[in-house]
Amino acid sequence: MHRREFLKRAGMLGAAVASGGLAGAVHGGERAGALPTIRLGDLEVSRLLLGSNPFFGFAHKPGDIGRRMTEYYTDEKIMADLDRAAAQGITAVVGPPFERWQKLFKTYLDRDGKLRIWISQPDRSPEKIPAEIEESVKAGAKAVYIQGHRVEQMYEKNTFEVVRGWVELIRKLGVPAGIGAHRTDCHLEAQKRNFPVDFYFQCMFNVAHGDSFEQGDPQKAAEVIRQLKKPVVAYKILGAGRVPPRQGFEFAFRNIRPKDGVCVGVFTKDNPDQIKENADLAKECSALSR
């Protein structure tokens, strides 16, 4: 290659990388510094998902932190955190289809909000779950998974096949379907019964019957995750604020597989950089998965 042609091609490559093009030429198919992605069915999302519990004051801790969360998180502050998350490469938020949330997220999208994917988490009483699933998809959810307490309720009442019907309805409506659990036996039973799920949400702490965060729970959850054939999103990896961030992220990513992800909520009142810090940890720790 002549020197002039070499310089021309080098200049074109540099310009493309600088503008975000030729992403496959850097860092294994992703832009340098970008969050890795996973697939939930046919939906591609960042490996770190944004949780929404703090937006609604679900602190899972004693004291007044839940009240402080609800006082802080106005609709405007929630939308600001959604954009903060998008700026760090997070592409999806997980949340229940509350009326407030549906209106808020529509307003956010209408304002050209940058985080475009909502994964819905129906959590009403069992007889209302089908309507909530349909409502979620109609409101724009790109995937739906049944909240863990509802799945466990059916499991414990020996009516687990009801969950299969919910999953089939989600898929019939054309979006990826999943189920959640805090226990470590529900997902294995769903797999044994061939429920047509696209993904699972597995809590790292068994808080099915109250906010009890036991030391050995994360290891038990990790053992289950590795037995599941479909992708898994691990949640409460920080034990609702009880586990130091680095410790929680490192443990989670060492114990999930490259096709799995994590969901982490934030409370940015006292630390506006919390979302960036979580994203940085996710990028750093992602290589620990095997």
Image (spheres, rainbow, N blue to C red):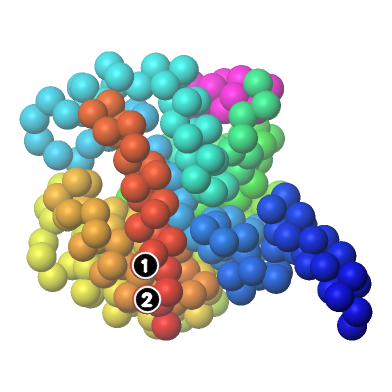
* Residue at image location 67% in from the left, 26% down from the top: 112
Amino acid on which disc 2 is placed: Leu
Separation of residues labelled 1 and 2 (CA atoms): 5 Å
Residue 130 placement, left or right of 247: right
Residue 121 belongs to magenta span: no
Residue 192 drawn at (x, y percent): 46, 81
Magenta highlight: main SS: helix
Image: 152 above or below 27: above
SS of the residue at dot 2? Answer: helix
Q: Which residues are magenta?
A: 99-110
SS of the residue at dot 1? Answer: helix
Residue 46 drawn at (x, y percent): 54, 56
Kindly identify which residue carries mark 1.
285
Residue 213 drawn at (x, y percent): 13, 56
Amino acid on which disc 1 is placed: Cys
Kindly identify which residue carries mark 2.
288
Q: Nearer the viewer, residue 167 or 114?
A: 114
* Residue at image location 62% in from the left, 60% down from the top: 31
Mark 1 touches mark 2? (CB < 8 Å): yes
Residue 103 placement, left or right of 172: left
Residue 165 drawn at (x, y percent): 57, 58
